Image (cartoon, rainbow, N blue to C red):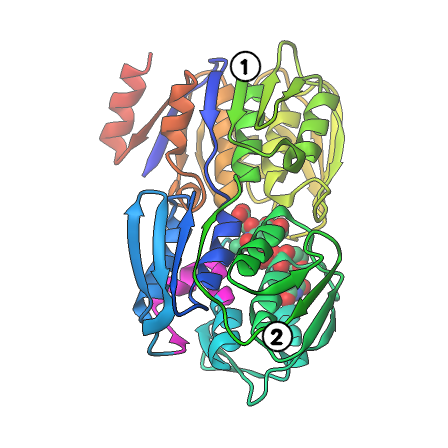
């Protein structure tokens, strides 16, 4: 499937942001650790979430959708600790089932994770954490095996700040015997959300949101009803959509504190950003200005917003430098953006961007989730028609992306084939 976009229309209006995908993935894994009903609210209806729900169902947990954004999970029927569906290899967060199953059953076997190809993405820190809790870890025939006769507390110092390892270790340690101290932990809002969710199930986790997390293991977890925090990256993407189209967009149902790094950059670039209790309004009236940015773990500028800010900077006045310090392979969209007239030179993990006055519509292909969203933003800002191919990546993490953009006035439609594309190009005058 492709998106056909007619660019050049300023986006104006309100958009409601959904639940955080990357929090939801940890939370769904946590949900199977109880043998009682766990109701998860504000769940985004995106592909990665639905794949994880399938995996959870396949091992015997019951998954009952109360509505599009609410699911009730009960882990009492789990009959295997082996997660090996083909589908699970397609998402990164399958690795959270390792921590959840290891904590609950003291053994887990999960296919090596897939996910967006944005770098080598090792899981050594996850495994190091499990080993500190007394588990044996092995890679056997493409499966990660973790097993512990006695799962106990441990003292772990992460060598790199990792969201995934922090969440995974919290999951397993929640049901280990004794206390765990996790140092150099990730501080992202979704780490805090997973900790809050586990605590609402009876876990004893303190310090999430700081770089030292203390977990006192408890014998079992109980049912809960939990609502996921808003998605910081979906919100940030719409904020940048306003900026690149010289629009006026209010993103609603957000936690403005989680968006501070994004808001600060938009202001440096000349946008007006107004914060409300649970909304942020971005107004952009004139040409954007250059800035420099380096991606960093939270509260730094998120790597998941790097392609979106690069699109904005490719239209800004002056020369900007974007340094990607988290993933080594996250500039793959640059060649696509060059087809639209952007002037970007990548050397190692730095992109030097010479802002151009305008981008021109072109046929481009999404290399991964966030880069795909960024190419859509480029299309919305460009003159003429842009066709973004491989939209399947975008659907991993954005719910009704095109529909939400249309509600802000954008001209963007889904096409199934070449005939559709031609028809839409003619219609979307
Ligand atoms: C999570 O990936 C997110 N994915 C990513 O979101 C996000 O880009 C990333 O965190 C950083 O914020 C999910 O939550 C499912 P990391 P994760 O472990 O957990 C290195 C999106 O677009 N590292 O924090 O895989 C790693 O190579 C996606 O929604 C190790 O060396 O990221 C990277 O350089 C894409 N060893 C750095 O740490 C390990 O064991 C941070 O990775 C683990 C990580």
Name the secondary structure under disc 1. Answer: loop
Which residue sits at x=38%, y=49%? 47
CB at mark 1 closer than 8 A to ligand 1? no
142 is within the stretch colored magenta: no
The residue to which callout 1 is attached is: 247
Which residue sits at x=42%, y=24%? 405
Name the secondary structure under disc 2. Answer: helix
Of the pair 415 and 198, the residue shown nearer to us:
198
Quick one: label 2, few (<14), some, or many (20+) residues within 10 Å?
Answer: many
- Residue 10 visible (yes or no): yes
Quick one: label 1, few (<14), some, or many (20+) residues within 10 Å?
Answer: many
Which residue sits at x=74%, y=29%? 320
The mark that comes first in sequence, 1 or 2, is 2
Which residue sits at x=60%, y=29%? 311
108 left or right, relative to 311: left
Quadrant housing residue 310: top right
86 is within the stretch colored magenta: yes
Please state the extent of the stretch shown in magenta in the rendering: 81-96
What is the CA distance from the residue labelled 1 to the residue labelled 2?
46 Å
**Where is residue 136 shown, x and y percent of the image?**
59, 85
Magenta stretch prevailing secondary structure: helix
CB at mark 2 closer than 8 A to ligand 1? yes
Quadrant of ligand 1: it is bottom right
Report how many numbered discs are placed on residues in the image.
Answer: 2
The residue to which callout 2 is attached is: 127
- Residue 360 visible (yes or no): no
Of the pair 156 and 41, the residue shown nearer to us:
41
């Amino acid at each position: 499937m492709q998106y056909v976009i007619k660019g050049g229309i300023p986006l104006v209006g309100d958009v409601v942001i959904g639940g955080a995908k990357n929090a939801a993935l940890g939370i769904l894994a946590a949900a199977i650790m109880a043998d009682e009903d766990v109701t998860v609210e504000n769940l985004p209806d995106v592909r990665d979430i639905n794949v994880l729900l399938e995996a959870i169902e396949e091992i015997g947990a019951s998954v009952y959708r109360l509505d599009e954004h609410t699911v009730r999970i009960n882990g009492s029927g789990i009959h295997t600790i082996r997660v090996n569906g083909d589908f699970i290899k397609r998402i990164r967060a399958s690795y959270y089932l390792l921590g959840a199953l290891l904590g609950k059953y003291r053994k887990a076997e999960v296919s090596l994770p897939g996910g967006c190809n944005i770098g080598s993405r090792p899981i050594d820190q996850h495994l190091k954490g499990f080993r500190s809790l007394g588990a044996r870890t092995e890679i056997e025939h493409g499966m990660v095996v973790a097993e512990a006769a006695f799962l106990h507390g441990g003292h772990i110092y992460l060598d790199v700040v990792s969201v995934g390892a922090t969440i995974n270790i919290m999951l397993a340690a929640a049901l280990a015997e004794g206390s765990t101290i996790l140092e150099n932990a990730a501080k992202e809002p979704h780490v805090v959300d997973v900790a809050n969710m586990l605590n609402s199930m009876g876990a004893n986790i303190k310090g999430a949101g700081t770089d030292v997390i203390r977990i006192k293991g408890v014998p079992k977890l109980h049912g809960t009803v939990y609502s996921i925090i808003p998605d910081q990256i979906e919100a940030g993407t719409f904020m940048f959509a306003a900026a690149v189209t010289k629009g006026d967009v209010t993103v609603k149902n957000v936690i403005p504190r989680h968006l501070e790094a994004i808001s600060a950059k938009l202001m440096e670039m000349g946008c007006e950003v107004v914060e409300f209790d649970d909304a942020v309004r971005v107004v952009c009236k004139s040409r954007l200005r250059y800035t420099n940015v380096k991606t960093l773990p939270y509260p730094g500028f998120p790597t998941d917003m790097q392609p979106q800010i690069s699109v904005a900077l490719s239209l800004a006045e002056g020369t900007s430098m974007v340094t990607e310090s988290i993933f080594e392979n996250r500039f793959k969209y640059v060649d696509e953006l060059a087809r639209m007239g952007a002037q970007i030179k990548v050397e190692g993990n730095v992109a030097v961007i010479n802002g151009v006055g305008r981008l021109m519509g072109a046929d481009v292909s999404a290399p991964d989730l966030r880069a795909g969203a960024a190419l859509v933003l480029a299309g919305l800002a460009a003159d003429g028609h842009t066709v973004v191919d491989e939209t399947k990546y975008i659907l991993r993490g954005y719910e009704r992306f095109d529909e939400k953009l249309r509600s802000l006035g954008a001209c963007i439609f889904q096409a199934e084939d070449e005939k559709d594309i031609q028809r839409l190009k003619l219609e979307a005058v």
